[in-house]
Amino acid sequence: MKVLVVEDEPKISEFLRSGLTGDGFLVTIATTGEEAKRLAKSDSFAAYILDIMLPDFDGIELCRKFRDDGITVPILMLTAKDALHDKVKGLSAGADDYLTKPFEYEELVARLRALIRKTQGYPRSTIQVGDLVIEPNQKTVQRGTTSLELSKKEYQLLEYLARHHNRLVTREMIAKTVWNCDTTTYTNIIDVFINYLRKKIDKENPIKLIHTVRGKGFLLSESPPGSES
Ligand code: CA
């Protein structure tokens, strides 16, 4: 399980690295906010441990930035400040928990585990479009009361459409994300898979969720494109 520690004080970051490594975590350390932002983009972590006083950034601002960018990774804030004011500020910026320095390592690791556990079984990861319910953790799909069996690729395509529901998704976006391919060579394949999904999701239902936007791409929505009035 990978954890990003954002901390500029070497004594504390090394203390965390040795403790967490011993507890089976893979620890990456960032010493500045910029480095943290770069790592957050290029790698995925189970949690961030974030110091508030960083050389280039206020950790609270950094936390808010992560949340604004749609990053939902649980964040544990660390700080020497123990004023209630900072705690409230940190939590309202989107941190999940808060620990003041000096802290006991045992308490930190217990809270970190609790945060990761909470996120991994989290109902907020459920994606719902109309009566279509997708559980990304279990990779299950349900329309109304009917469970649907999808192939791996069908599921990946549907999850991608659902994460962008009510927004146009182009074939290029799908090719790049679902097929990991930059070109539009996959256009035909994409159409084939959209048809597979239509058969499984929409065929038996009077309310169609998958819409084609001619010449542009697709849209997963309860209402067909251009129907809002
Ligand atoms: Ca610091």
Image (spheres, grey):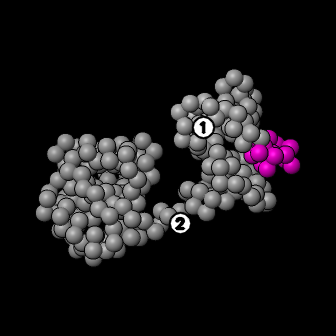
Residue 199: within the magenta?
yes
Residue 11: within the magenta?
no
Name the residue that disc number 2 marks.
121
Image coords of residue 209 (percent x, y): 75, 41
Taking 227 as reference, is 74 left or right?
Answer: left
Segment tinted magenta in the rendering: 196-209
**Disc 1 element:** helix
Image coords of residue 77 (percent x, y): 29, 58
Taking 109 as reference, is 161 left or right?
Answer: right
The residue at 53%/62% (across/down) is 122
The residue at 72%/24% (across/down) is 214
Residue 190: which numbered mark, if any?
Answer: none
Taking 66 as reference, is 134 left or right?
Answer: right
Amino acid type, label 1? Ile
Name the residue nearer the viewer: 185 or 8. Answer: 185
Taking 52 as reference, is 25 left or right?
Answer: right
